[in-house]
Image (spheres, rainbow, N blue to C red):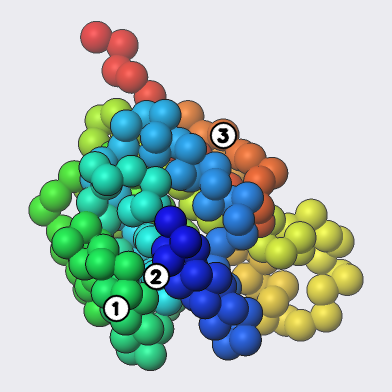
Amino acid sequence: MVNDYGVIKEIKDYADINNVPIMTSEGISYITNYIVKHQVTEILEIGTAIGYSAIMMALSSSDVHITSIERDEKRYLEALKNIKKLELEDRIELIYNDAFDVNLDGTFDLILIDAAKAQNIKFFEKFERNLKQTGVIITDNLNFHGLVDKDEESIKSKNLRALVRKVKDYITFLKNNKDYETEFLDIGDGLSVSKLKKSLE
Ligand code: SAH
Ligand code: MG
């Protein structure tokens, strides 16, 4: 739709100008294709920012319902505004809170982790109880803007180095997690796709 397209362009421009780290087109395309292919309906997102990825996921299928959590007030308010503009408020429910203070009863087909990169293991461990047996946990930014593959010494900032180490720890955590089969995809800024292994009963 021409109208939707215009609003999405505005959202992307806003992200650009205000340095909001929204997913790349490539990354979000992979996810929307996944949604359609696997008939995903219930989605949980950690890290709404201004609603870009939630909106793209909602637009991929009219059966999709999203719960998305954001702790930054300014971004949350911007996301609310964007969701209203596209009349998606019936299908995208926003929670303004720190994800670690949110306890959900529902279960989801897809959980998208795209929040504070140092906390990925904790997000995974907190929200895996909300994953359906057939569900998937997708995490964004596993390349961390190309820094994960870089020589650590070449990263000058100590904080950044610590963050990159955390992303590497998360990758190790996923590789060692016997309950899940994880694929690592060099799409966008790097995605992991973790599915529960079938029990051998
Ligand atoms: N998924 C969005 C981008 C999210 S950017 C998109 O692609 O359009 C990451 C967001 O996670 C930031 O806005 C940040 O405020 C939020 N965030 C980080 N840690 C969080 C936490 N513990 N709880 C809730 N939101 C968090
Ligand atoms: Mg991201």
| Count of numbered marks | 3
**Toward the viewer: 36 or 4?**
4
Quick one: SS at disc 1? helix
Residue 64 in view: yes
* Residue annotated with mark 2: 51
* Residue annotated with mark 3: 183
Inter-mark Cα distance, 2 to 3 = 26 Å
Asked whether disc 1 touches disc 2, contact meaning CB atoms under 8 Å apart, the reply is: yes
Mark 1, mark 3: which one is toward the viewer? Answer: 1
For marks 1 and 3 on the same chain, the one whose residue lies earlier in the sequence? 1
**Toward the viewer: 60 or 142?**
60
Compared across the picture, whether 9 is left or right of 107 comes to: right
For badge 2, the amino acid type reads Gly
Quick one: SS at disc 3? strand
Of all residues, the one furthest to the top in this rendering is 201
Q: For the residue carrying disc 2, how many other residues have a C-alpha within 10 Å: few (<14), some (14-19), or many (20+)?
A: many
Residue 191: % across, % down: 58, 47
- To which quarter of the image does residue 46 belong? bottom left
